[in-house]
């Protein structure tokens, strides 16, 4: 799989170099300029979304301050069970907010990919001539909202442990579950980042082909 991805990336880079060399002496069509600007904006937004996902995990770690067992015992009231643990509502609230933000970023990524598909479908040739089937290359396990919903569904058992995870799971189960869900989601997004970038590059290559073909049709 890695060899195939590298081969596709090299092929795309060669095509881009060839296209750039040819375009130096060719006036750029206005439509090409507009589409290129939109593509650049999409790629920048996609990169920003990934960075924000990573920042979400980092911030949740910085603000998480689970109480130690000694502190719990000192804060216990004799004969009372309601004050046994010191829950930090702010931590739970921040993790909740970050989880929603990441879900929103994933929706934006899905919209960007859909817009790129629509641009590709405007080709004067049959859409099948520029068809790019990501499932045939990357399989059906690409990171998506469906994957996210599976990770956050009821009964999901996080497999990622941190040094303080057992204490957090025992003392603050809700905060632990939210943090582990976010951790798994970020790690999955990072693992699939290269595949997502390759898929975007493939779409851009299709659009370049479409623009070249479109210019030829207009010249006729």
Image (cartoon, rainbow, N blue to C red):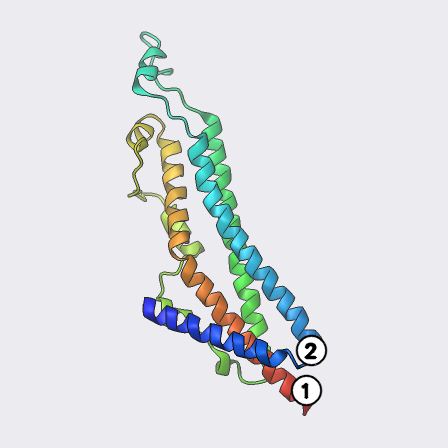
- Between discs 1 and 2, the one toward the N terminus: 2
User: Would residue 215 be visible to someone looking at this image?
Assistant: yes
Q: Are marks 1 and 2 in contact (CB under 8 Å)?
A: yes
Q: Is residue 94 above or below residue 74?
A: below
User: Which numbered dot is residue 29?
Assistant: 2
Q: Is residue 97 above or below residue 105?
A: above
Q: Secondary structure at mark 2?
A: loop
User: Would residue 99 be visible to someone looking at this image?
Assistant: no
User: Which numbered dot is residue 218?
Assistant: 1
User: Which numbered dot is residue 9?
Assistant: none
Q: Tell me what residue is drawn at x 52 percent, y 80 percent.
A: 127
Quarter of the image containing the C terminus?
A: bottom right
Relative horizontal placement of residue 92, taking residue 85 as reference (left or right): right
Image quadrant in which you'd find residue 1: bottom left
Q: Residue furthest bottom?
A: 220
Q: Tell me what residue is drawn at x 37 percent, y 55 percent.
A: 191
User: Foreground mark, 1 or 2?
Assistant: 2
x, y (%) of residue 63?
46, 30
Q: Residue furthest top?
A: 78
> How many numbered circles are shown?
2
Q: Tell me what residue is drawn at x 62 percent, y 79 percent.
A: 23
x, y (%) of residue 43?
55, 60
Q: Secondary structure at mark 1?
A: helix
Q: Tell me what residue is drawn at x 49 percent, y 32 percent.
A: 93
């Amino acid at each position: 799989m890695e060899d195939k991805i590298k081969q596709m990336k090299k092929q795309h880079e060669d095509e881009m170099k060839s296209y750039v060399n040819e375009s130096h002496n060719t006036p750029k069509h206005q439509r090409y300029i507009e589409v290129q600007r939109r593509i650049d904006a999409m790629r920048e937004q996609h990169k920003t979304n990934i960075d924000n996902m990573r920042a979400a995990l980092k911030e949740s770690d910085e603000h998480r301050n689970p109480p130690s067992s000694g502190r719990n015992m000192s804060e216990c009231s004799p004969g009372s069970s309601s004050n046994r643990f010191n829950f930090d509502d702010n931590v739970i609230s921040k993790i909740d907010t970050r989880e929603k933000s990441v879900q929103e970023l994933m929706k934006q990524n899905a919209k960007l990919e859909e817009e790129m598909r629509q641009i590709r479908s405007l080709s004067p040739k049959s859409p099948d001539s520029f068809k790019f089937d990501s499932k045939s290359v990357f399989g059906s396990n690409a990171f998506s909202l469906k994957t996210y919903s599976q990770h956050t569904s009821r009964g999901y058992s996080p497999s990622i442990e941190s040094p303080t995870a057992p204490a957090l799971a025992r003392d603050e189960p809700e905060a632990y579950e939210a943090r582990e869900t976010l951790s798994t989601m970020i790690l999955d997004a990072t693992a699939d980042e290269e595949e997502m970038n390759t898929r975007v590059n493939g779409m851009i290559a299709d659009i370049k082909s479409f623009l070249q073909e479109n210019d030829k049709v207009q010249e006729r």
